[in-house]
Amino acid sequence: MARVLAVLGVGVVPADTPVLRADDLGVLRGDGVFETMHVRNGEPWLLNEHLDRMARSAALLALPLPSRAELVELAGQACAAWPAETEGALRLVCTRGPEDGGPVTAFATLAPIAPASIAARLDGVAVATATLGVPAEARTEAPWLLGGAKTLSYAVNMASLRWAAQQGVGDVLWVSVDGYALEAPTATLVWLADGVLSTVPAATTGILAGTTAAYLLSQAEELGMRAAERLVRPAELHTADGVWLASSVRGLTEVRSLDGVPLGPSPETTRMQKLLGYV
Amino acid sequence: MARVLAVLGVGVVPADTPVLRADDLGVLRGDGVFETMHVRNGEPWLLNEHLDRMARSAALLALPLPSRAELVELAGQACAAWPAETEGALRLVCTRGPEDGGPVTAFATLAPIAPASIAARLDGVAVATATLGVPAEARTEAPWLLGGAKTLSYAVNMASLRWAAQQGVGDVLWVSVDGYALEAPTATLVWLADGVLSTVPAATTGILAGTTAAYLLSQAEELGMRAAERLVRPAELHTADGVWLASSVRGLTEVRSLDGVPLGPSPETTRMQKLLGYV
C-alpha cells in the first residue's frame, strides 16, 4: 500500500512531492502541530476528538490553523485515495509557514500501519522507565513549556524510543524526577487496579491528553470498571491487574514487562481492544 | 537582500523552492540538527566550531550527517551567492530524511539579519526570567533528553519568545526549578562580576554550549578578565558588572533590564562587541 499525500489548497499529489520550503518554521523550529488518527473503513476514527485536540495545541502555540472544514476536507481527500478495507495511519500536520510570514502549511499523509505496531497489539510490549527530567506537576503553570500540546518538536520522543531499542525493549515509560509515571513518547499509560481503569491526569502534569485512552475510559462502565485519573509510581504498576499503552495507530498494547519484571497477560486486553475496534 | 538556498547534491535553487517531503522526519518529528552562523566578509564566522557542535548534536541523535566536506561545500555555495559586503545569517540544517528510510536532507539558507537583531546590539534587550521546568542538573545523566544537542525541536524556544513579547520584553532567561539561570531560548548567558567573565556550565546542565560565548571567554585575558563557568541565580545578576546574551546572529547583546529591574549599561559592551567583530 503506497503512502497518500494531500496538501491543503492543492489536493492529492504524489507522496514524494516536496511540500515544505526550507524557511518553513515547521522545519526550522519544529513549530507546528499534528495529529495521528487510525483509519478504518475508509474513515479516520475519532476525527472530531483529534481536531479538538489539534485546536487546543494550536491555541497553546498561537498558531492560526486552517478552518475545521478545510482540515476535514484534507483528511477526506487522503482517505478517498485509500482502499476502504485497509487500516491506515492518517497524519494531519500544520506548520507555522515561512519565517518571513505567510499562511500555515497544512497537509495530510495516509500510510500503512507498520507490521511491528500490529504485532504489538497481539504480543504486547516490553517497556523500560526513563526520566523525563521534570517534576510531575511543574509544567502546567508555565504555558510556554507547551504542556499538553502535540507539536512537531518530537526529537526527545524519538531519542527516547531509540534509547529503548538500545535497551532491547519496545517502548519507554517516562517518569518524573519525583518518581511518578507520566506517559510514553507516543502513547498514554492506562492501568487497571481493584476494578478501576486509570490514566495519568493531563491537566496537572502537562502530558498529552490521550484520545484513545479517553475513549477507553469513557467506556469503563461497559467493561464493568470504574474510571479515574491519578498519579502512579512504577512500583504500583508491578502489582496492577493490567497495564497498557494506548495510542491511535497501535491501539491498545499491553505492557508485558516493566524494567525487566514480567507483567500480565491481562484477560481484559482482547475485550478492550475489541471495544476500541482494533481486532 | 533576498534569501539564498543551497541544497546538498543540488546546489543553489530559488529560495522558495520546496525541498522537504511531507514524510521527512525533520518535519514530522523535529528530528534533525542545525547551526546558525554569522556571515561576514562573505564567510561564516567560526565555521569549524559550528560544524564541531553539529557533529556533537548529530551523535546525540544518532543522525548520520553528510561528510564535513559536503557541509563546508554547502555553506560555501550559499555564501558564494551572497554579497561579501553584507552581513547575513547562515543556517545549516540536516534532517533525518524520509520516515521509511533514506539519506538526511541537508540544506543551507542565508538570509539578511533582522533589523531588530541589529538594533539589540546597540540598545540591549529587556529580559524576563521564566522556568524551564527542570532541575539545573537533571538532564546530563539522561542522554535521551538530548541536553546539549541543537535540534530542530524548538517549539518551546519559540513559545518562550512569544511569551516574552506578551510580557513586553525582548528575550527570556530560562531558570531551573531549583532557581538557577540556565540560558535564553536562542542565546547563551554571560556575566561579569569581580573581573570574572562567566557563563553557565553546559556539561552539567544540558544547556547548549554557546559558540559565541565560548569564543568570548577564550579572549577574556585580552579583555583583562578571567573566565569561568559556574551556576548563578538571577538575584546575583542584578548586582553583576555586566550581563549579556551571546548568539551567532545578534552577537553580544547587553541585558538592560531583568524582570523589570534596570541593569547596566556596562562600559565593556562595545569593547567586547568589537572583539567579536559585531561592530
Image (cartoon, coloured by chain):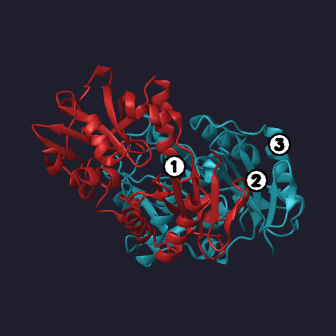
Chain colours: A cyan, B red
Question: What residue would you read off at disc 3?
Answer: A70
Near mark 2 (Cα within 10 A), the count class, few <14, some 14-19 or many ≥20, is many
Labels 3 and 1 within one chain: no
Image quadrant holding the C terminus of chain B, namely top left
Residue in the picture at 28% in, 21% down: B262
Residue A218 point in image, percent of width and height: 64, 45
Chain letter of the residue beneath label 3 in the structure image: A
Question: What residue would you read off at disc 2?
Answer: A107
The reply, left or right, for residue B118 in relation to residue B179 is right
Q: Would you say the residues marked 2 and 1 are in contact, meaning their CB atoms lie under 8 Å apart?
A: no
Residue A231 in sight here: yes
Residue in the picture at 20% in, 29% down: B235
Residue B28 in sight here: no
Q: Quick one: SS at disc 2?
A: strand
Image quadrant holding the N terminus of chain B, namely top right
Labels 3 and 2 within one chain: yes
Residue lying furthest front: B85
Near mark 1 (Cα within 10 A), the count class, few <14, some 14-19 or many ≥20, is few
Q: Would you say the residues marked 3 and 2 are in contact, meaning their CB atoms lie under 8 Å apart?
A: no
Residue flagged by tag 1: what amino acid is it? Glu
Q: Quick one: SS at disc 3?
A: helix
Residue closer to the observer: B58 or A126: B58
Per the model, the C-alpha gap separating discs 3 and 1 is 46 Å
Residue in the picture at 47% in, 61% down: A241
Residue flagged by tag 2: what amino acid is it? Phe
Residue closer to the observer: B69 or A153: B69
Chain letter of the residue beneath label 1 in the structure image: B
Residue in the picture at 38% in, 74% down: A260
Question: What residue would you read off at disc 1?
Answer: B85
